[in-house]
Structure formats: structure tokens, C-alpha cells
Image (tube, rainbow, N blue to C red):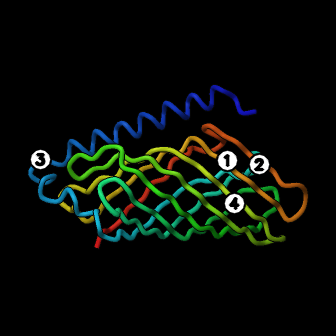
Amino acid sequence: MKPIANSVRSFWSTSIVIAMAAAFAGAVCPASVMAAGKNADIGHLGVGLAWQPLELGGNTGTANTGYVTGRYWFNKQWGLDGGLGMGLPSVSSPSRFMVNLSVQPMYALKRWGTSVFYANAHMIPSITTGNGTALLLSFSAGVGIEAALPGIDEVRWFMQLNPFSVDYYSPPVGGSSTGLDFFGAVMPVSVGLHYYF
């Protein structure tokens, strides 16, 4: 069982970061810029890079993963993000390399100017190699913010907070493990950039 104090600290520190990001998004984009390019993401493919930490099921270990991702908003409410990632898990058996897929539908809760505040459900199936093959399946849910860089409406940064997660980890030897977490062993934040064509 993870200490409650760690979860509380993670919650407040992450909430402060999200709040600061939202304030920054509104402050750096004047009304004229917002009006000119507020829908540049809708109906356009965004391609970019992202980073996200993962927790292996049952507090077995953690992994830092980088992704090449694509994001597409079908309309003002619904979007889809998918990508291919790689990482180096920190587990008891060394020499592991992780390859994973990322799929997440998104629903816009609020749009203002060139920014959008959204809810997401994230699924990440993964395979690790080295000293046998291990499988990981992660489901998480949370919220995120996406906003245009000042003066460059086609480039948009995003930050997500996914505090709720269910992780299933099956190592090459030993029993499988499952973890159900609310702010688990790693900070449940992902960040990245997309260029919308």
C-alpha cells in the first residue's frame, strides 16, 4: 500500500502544474490571435513527440517512454490520439527494452481561443524484451490541456494528468501482477508537442 502522504503531494503538485499551464495558455494568446486560428486543430492531423512514465502492475517497476504520436480532432468535441513508443523499464531483471502502442479517445470539456481542456481514456499495450518477454497492459483516465505556441498556431503543446490507472504486468518468470492506482508510484503526467498540417 502506498503512503497516503505521497499521493496527496503528487495530487497537489500536479494540480498546480496543470493550473499554471492553463493560465499561461490564456495569458500568452491575445484575443486577435485566438480569433484568427482557434480551429487550426479541428480536421487536421497533428504529428509530434510525447513523453510519459508508466507504472508496471502491482508496483513491480516503472518505465519512462517516449512516443511518436498522431492526434486528430474530428470536431469541436471528439478527438483521437495514437502513437508508437519505446522505453527502458526499471525492473528487477536488467537489460529490458519496451515497445508499446498508445491509443486514447479524447472529449473536449472546454474550448477557449487556441486552447482546449479535455478528458481522455488511455490504453497502452506493451512488450518488453531481454531475459524473456514480458507483457504490460495499462488503462488510465484523466484530463489534459492543449494550447498553441504564441504566434505559431499550428504547433500545440499538451499536458495530461491521468491519476486513475489499472495496470496488468506478466513477467517471463513468476506470477502476473495487477495494480489499481490513484496517483501511483510515478507522477501520472504526460507532455508533448504536435504540429498540425
| SS category of the residue bearing label 1 | strand
* Label whose residue precedes the other's in the sequence (4 or 3): 3
Q: Which residue is mark 1?
A: 166
Q: Which residue is mark 3?
A: 31
Q: Is the residue under label 1 in contact with that under label 2 (CB below 8 Å)?
A: yes
Towards the viewer: 137 or 28? 137
- Who's the residue at 29% across and 55% down the image? 76
Amino acid at dot 3:
Ala
- Who's the residue at 71% across and 33% down the image? 2
Amino acid at dot 2:
Thr
Could you classify mark 4 by the number of other residues whose Cα lies within 10 Å: few (under 14), some (14-19), or many (20 or more)? many
In three-dimensional space, the C-alpha distance between marks 4 and 3, rounded to whole angstroms, equals: 44 Å
Could you classify mark 3 by the number of other residues whose Cα lies within 10 Å: few (under 14), some (14-19), or many (20 or more)? few
* Label whose residue precedes the other's in the sequence (4 or 1): 4
Quadrant of the snapshot with the N terminus? top right
Give the number of the mark in front: 4 or 3.
3
Drawn side of residue 39 relative to residue 132, left or right: left
Q: Which residue is mark 4?
A: 89
- How many marks the image carries: the answer is 4
* Label whose residue precedes the other's in the sequence (4 or 2): 4
Towards the viewer: 167 or 131? 167
In three-dimensional space, the C-alpha distance between marks 2 and 1, rounded to whole angstroms, equals: 7 Å
